[in-house]
Image (spheres, coloured by chain):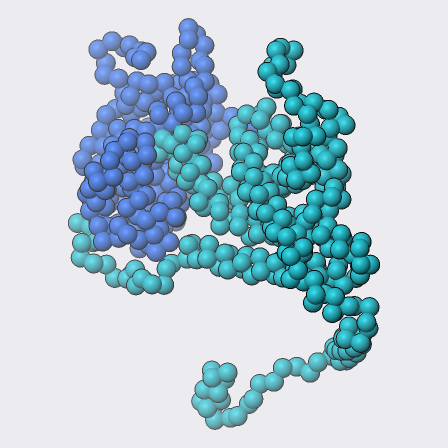
Chain colours: A blue, B cyan
Amino acid sequence: MTMTTKGGSVPTPKVDLQGVIKRFGDLQVLNGIDLQISSGEVCCLIGPSGSGKSTLLRMVNGLLLTDEGRVYVDGTLMGFREEGNDLIGITSPQLARQRRNIGMVFQRFNLFPHLTALDNVTIGPIKLLQMNRKKAENKAQELLAQVGLSARASYYPNELSGGQQQRIAIARALAMDPSVMLFDEPTSALDPELVGEVLSVIKSLAADGMTMLVVTHEISFAREVADTVVFMDQGKIVEKGPPEQILTRPQSGRTQDFLARATEAR
Amino acid sequence: MTADIQESVQTGQTDKRKPPPRGKMTYVAIAVVTIGLLGLAQDVVTNPNFGWRVVAQYVFSGYILKGLTLTIALTVLVMLLGTLGGLVIAMMRISNSVFLKIVANCYINLFRGIPLLIQVLFWFNIAALFPNIRIGIPFGPTFSELDTNMLVTPFIAAVIALTLNEIAYMAEIIRGGLLGVDSGQYEAAEALGMPPRMTLNVILPQAIRIIIPPTANQLITTFKNTALVSVIGLADLLHSAQIVYAINYQTIPLLITASLWYLLLSSLLNWLQSVLEKRYSKGFQPRTNRRKPSTDKTPEETLV
């Protein structure tokens, strides 16, 4: 539609947040966020709880809409259409359409409990992409194999462990062929021994070149997988850069404090 | 029990467990209730005014059964229409539109706030308010005009009054069910890219589990509330009994006859409710007819 030609020859970033401000009532949760993620980049968001990481993630796929500033994904403005200098809100079905190529994985998995693992993965392609059932199921089987759960296709979520549920949730998001994946603390609700299996699935996605934005408390995982680490505090980006810089030689005192506490807790 | 015995075997002692002694008040209560019930039983059997012979004579009579059929038909119709309408009002209440929310709130407030008996009487007498029903465009042309009394028979009046009331109650029950589903489910559906209508398709099956118990309860209430239509001369179960005792003056025996049917069907619905509740809670527990997922992983599940 209105592909804004920003910067001419510079390639459009996959995800582009420009001066994003979000308020919940009187509380300003995001105080002007600028962040660009290019294609194939893995960006890990770290920071204390309440710093606005999860809110930021929900602005990217329009689960929350900006109060000020703009969010572009693949060059498309999320949640609004531009008319001159004004932004006009789009309808819910239009917004739903915008979300279809953005995958999201939640802290508490949020699988549909009345559907089997297979049906959880096929529901998106069948209902939203009008894919025929046979094709959708073949694809779902491939994805379940990719997350190592072929044998669990006919199981209901409550029959599976947290780690298995989260891997199904990743398969569900991948089934929509997303161009960006968002992870909201994907391992925070897991027993420690189940964290590894989920992180290794995310790592393999990173290796395949998936563009990802990951909110995480796993510092060592961020060090290993991230191209960029962003440290947030009080609704602002305090520091961002490659992991070795942010995690090993942080410039800001707040980052240093946070990392000291985060590693201490391990 | 067996655990107790096993333990006592282990320790080599026999210590039988007994409940603590009952309090004095319990014995008093047992005595009072027993004496009361015996007295009542004696009266029920010996007092001729109960008229058990009359009850036996009428309980399966065609007249009473016809009334019962109407009561059941009314209940089913009102419940079906009320549930559909309730779903619409519930969705309006949880929608993002302030306008729809206000309309739904006003509706619920209005129909829950006026005694059902008055609503029944009102719809029965609607012709006094609108002698003719005009089908057309407001301030515009009229396509058709009908005599209200022809259109709104006592049965239609009863259905309208009970349904409008039912919608208000069902709307609240359904809304409760929809709000009872974890908000993460809404987020997951939305994040997949589902439009609102499809999101509801995912949420509703989960909400049913929460909606069923209060709905069954509401069904029993509605079933009994249909007795109110006797005031507008509709020959339901109660009114049929009333017509009979107006002739033979056997008021108590015929009220007992009607009550027996109300009680029997209410008990049946009660039982049905507990069956449904069990069934729908099962969907959210691991099924027993399948082996539990093993904690040790099959080779293919171990990630490389």
Q: Is residue A35 visible?
A: no
> How many numbered callouts?
0
> Looking at the image, which is closer to me, B272 or A208?
B272
Residue in view at x 28 percent, y 10 percent: A5
Up/down of A138 relative to B42, above or below: above
Residue in view at x 72 percent, y 39 percent: B120
> Looking at the image, which is closer to me, A175 or B290?
B290
Residue in view at x 74 percent, y 69 percent: B52
In the displayed structure, does residue A237 sit left or right of residue A245?
right
x, y percent for residue A13: 27, 20
Residue A93: name its quadrant.
Answer: top left
In the displayed structure, does residue A192 sit left or right of residue B233?
left
x, y percent for residue B203: 44, 41
x, y percent for residue B26: 74, 77
Up/down of A131 relative to A154, above or below: above
Residue in view at x 36 percent, y 31 percent: B193
> Looking at the image, which is closer to me, A125 or B266?
B266
In the displayed structure, does residue B227 sit left or right of residue A195?
right
Up/down of B67 relative to A217, above or below: below
Q: Is residue B20 visible?
A: yes
x, y percent for residue B51: 78, 68
